[in-house]
Image (tube, rainbow, N blue to C red):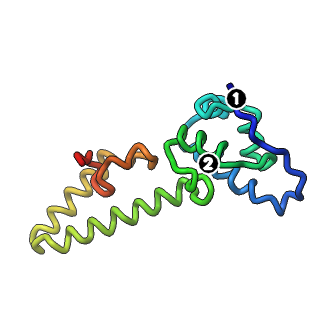
Amino acid sequence: MYCSIIEITTQPKETRVEEDVGHFIKEWRMEAELSQGELAKLAGMSPAALSMLEAGKASYSKRTLVPIAKALEVTPGMLLDKHPRQVESERGSEFAESILMLLEKIEPEDRELAYELLKSVARHKPKIKKPGLAGLNEHPVYGLKRND
């Protein structure tokens, strides 16, 4: 069953807020490596409806954003105002800050060893896991599973 809670907009292109949101839906979909058809199926809507949302030709509501966000493992708010690369950049800043704090705690003679270790890890595992809601049960810096 498809949800058909979209409305065709007739506003001029430059005044449609939905177009920006459509862009982020598309970017998040592409980040998740899903086709429009795959995401539409996961979100319980028709591929045509999703296409119209992505193109900014349809209005969105909570009822349309929530299933899309759930399928993409992000929050509806992220679809509204966060580009996937922005989230990745913010998460990278958190990592960098945490690493610097740890380095300050290490004895000066051990910092070079820590640096060499990080270089080694970077060479062998260059890709960091993509952000999404699935990672919320993990430690925000180390990716370790939380037990709480």
Mark 1 is surrounded, within 10 Å at the Cα level, by few (under 14), some (14 to 19) or many (20 or more) other residues, namely: few
- Numbered disc 1: secondary structure: loop
Q: Is residue 99 left or right of residue 6?
A: left
Q: Which mark is residue 27?
A: 2
Residue in the foreground of this view, choosing between 8 and 29:
8
Residue in the foreground of this view, choosing between 54 and 9:
9
Quick check: can you spot residue 32?
no
The span from disc 2 to disc 1 (Cα, nearest Å) is 22 Å
- Which badge, 2 or 1, comes first in the chain's sequence? 1
The quadrant the N terminus occupies is top right
Q: Position of residue 52 (x, y in %)?
A: 77, 41
Write down the residue under mark 1. 2
Which residue lies at the image location 14% right of the left edge and 62% below the top edge?
A: 113
Q: Is residue 71 above or below residue 141?
A: above
Give the residue type at disc 1.
Tyr
Q: How many marks?
A: 2
